[in-house]
Amino acid sequence: MRTAVASALATAVALAGLTGCSGGSHEQARTKPVAAESSPDTSPPPVPLTLAVAAKAFQSFVTNEDVARASGDERLALWWTSEGQSQLTAAAFRRAMAAGDPVPRYRYGTPTLYVPKLKAEGQQWFVASVRRTLADGKGAHTVLMGFVKSKPTMRWRLSLATLLDKKQKPPKIAVDDQGYARPLATFDTGLLIPPRDVPPIQATLAEEGPGNVAAKVMATGRHTTSYYTSDQKAAKPKKGSGLKVDTVYATTSFPIFPLATTDGGGIVLYALSRDAVSTKSKKKPGHVPIPKDAAPFVEPDLVHNELDVNQTLQFATLVPPATKKGATSEEKAAIIAADGGTIKATVPVK
């Protein structure tokens, strides 16, 4: 993990303006190539992504999500999600079942849609910014949502949803005179950090703390070094407890959503995984404690000297433009939205 992160960090720092690079390409961003259709003669022609198509896809998701949550139909809920959002959705149903409660339902306001112009035959995606509350009107947040259609023949699915920090204003995303947002290439060097290097740099700060060189390009504090601080406290066993916790943050293979902002920078939506392994010396009495958010995922009687808790975390980060050669700037990438939680807890099989 640290070798991979260090490699990504070295690339990012070299490209990020610390060595004076600027400029870049704004090609279509995609996470993986899309396979050609095996039967082009029988497949329907791909539908171009337009503002109207995105609006319909958003409404279809909202309607079906509410039906699924109201009826407790996990299968339907998962049918409209993918990647990290599928993991978190399944976890929400698991927690509700364990507690004997209904699955939380949401109410959405009118969304602002950021729709890039992409090739109809390739992977398509768009981002929505919308106010969301629980069904009773409580818990209001602005949520940033990334939707993906990985193949022309597949449906639109919600891949990622993250909550804008309190008191944080919505990002100013650049749109053209037709209302379309400008996508960024994952390798775009016009930003302080290329979009594909934002996740590993955050993982570095979360795992290694403010002393790492990554702090030169990404702000420390909440969502970065605060994780490191809390994990370090957990990693140091209390005297006589025999308990240790080892935590690792890693990038995922899930899609990322990079869009240009009006200041010449960009916003990147993405996910990280967090794996925390708790172990307890067999010489000390008692078992490994089970975190409250992990309780629905494991049988307490099976937990003895080790517990592995997996989380999916979803973020949105504002990245300033790269500084020009010879210029200095105090601006750093800043995480403005975060959400996620535990998706699995397991014990080792002996």
Image (spheres, helix red, strand yellow):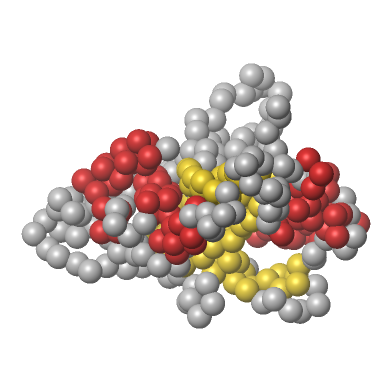
Is 262 displayed left or right of 304 in the figure? left
Q: Please count the marks in the image.
A: 0
Q: Nearest the camera: 106 or 64?
A: 106
The quadrant in which residue 18 appears is bottom left
Horizontal and vertical percent position of residue 238: 54, 58
Give the quadrant of the N terminus.
top left
Q: Is residue 87 visible to the viewer in this orientation of the structure?
A: no
User: For this view, does 249 lie left or right of residue 284?
Assistant: left
Q: Which residue is at 29% across, 57% downward?
A: 211
Is residue 70 rendered to the left or right of residue 131? right
Indicate whether 4 appears above or below 229: above
List x then y, in percent, for residue 8.
Answer: 33, 41
Q: In the picture shown, does residue 141 fall above or below 301?
A: below
Name which quarter of the figure residue 99 lies in: bottom right
Task: Please say whether residue 36 is visible from this viewpoint.
Answer: yes
**Residue located at (50% from left, 33% from top):** 32
Residue appearing at x 30%, y 45% in the figure: 9
Q: Is residue 275 left or right of residue 298?
A: left
